[in-house]
Amino acid sequence: MTARTAHIDQFTIDRLPAADEQPDFLFDLPELEYPEHLNAAAEIMDRHIANGRGPHPALITPEGTWSYQQLHETINRICHVLTEDFGIVPGNRVLLRSANNAFLTACWFAVLRIGAVAVTTMPLLRAHDLVPIINKGQIRHALCDASLKAEMENSRRQTSLLEKVCYFGDGAETPESLEAQMASKPAEFEAVKTLATDP
């Protein structure tokens, strides 16, 4: 029996190339023998916590150092916001818009942990670049650094698809900010059991 995808929203899966048009994926080395179910975010993060590396540095940035435990808990709190407050289900696409920083990393892992599809964009993109991405990907949710709010709102006015845009980072200190919404959320979240082959 073939395992079923975890994606409730199968938009991405339905748009993959036909099987005979895809490359041959060879996993014949022992270290490439992945289990049938694999959540990339859980695989990468959870083992550090399980192996006692929670207090160790995970991310070192000019703004400071995040431990594995801090990153893990931030990811899980974001997961609760995405699933409970935004209603995101596995397979939904989530637009991520930010410069490279620790909080974007946490958002990216959270999207994967809930079984959704991260669509990460460069800060340089403007509305005329973003709107086609949003429309083509049928993206309904976005997490955006507050420093990029003007162009995100400009994009939002040009498409009816975006249902929820949530801002984070400096300048997002409002009750609607991602940080405010995740503050009361639990620090644990069970990763969605995605197939190793789910996009």
Image (spheres, rainbow, N blue to C red):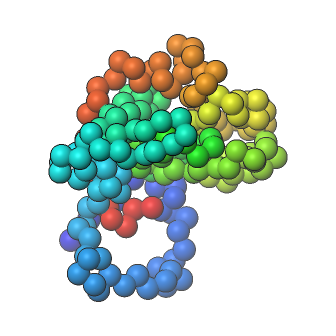
Between 107 and 190, the one nearer to me in the picture: 107
Relative height, residue 5 to residue 166 (above, below): below
Quarter of the image that includes the N terminus: bottom left
Q: How many marks?
A: 0
Q: Identify which residue is drawn at 42% across, 28% down.
A: 81
Determine whether, in the image, residue 7 is placed left or right of residue 102.
left
Q: In which quarter of the image is residue 189?
A: top left
Residue 16: tell me if it is visible: yes
Q: Is residue 161 above or below residue 133?
A: above
Q: Residue reaching furthest left?
A: 51
Residue 87 visible to an observer of this rendering:
no
Where residue 181 sits in the image (x, y, percent)?
Answer: 45, 20
The reply, left or right, for residue 136 in relation to residue 6 is right
**Residue 111, located in which quarter of the rendered image?**
top left
- Return the residue nearer the eye: 96 or 156: 96
Vertical position of residue 129 compared to residue 145: above or below: below
Residue at (37%, 67%) from the top-left corner? Answer: 197
17 over 66 or under it: above or below: below
Residue 146 position by quadrant: top right
- The single residue placed furthest to the right in the displayed view is 128
Q: In this view, does 69 lie to the left or right of 75?
A: left
Q: Where is residue 150 in the image (x, y as percent from the top left)?
A: 76, 29
Q: Quadrant of the C terminus?
A: bottom left
Q: Where is residue 177 in the image (x, y as percent from the top left)?
A: 54, 21
The residue located at (51%, 50%) in the rendering is 118
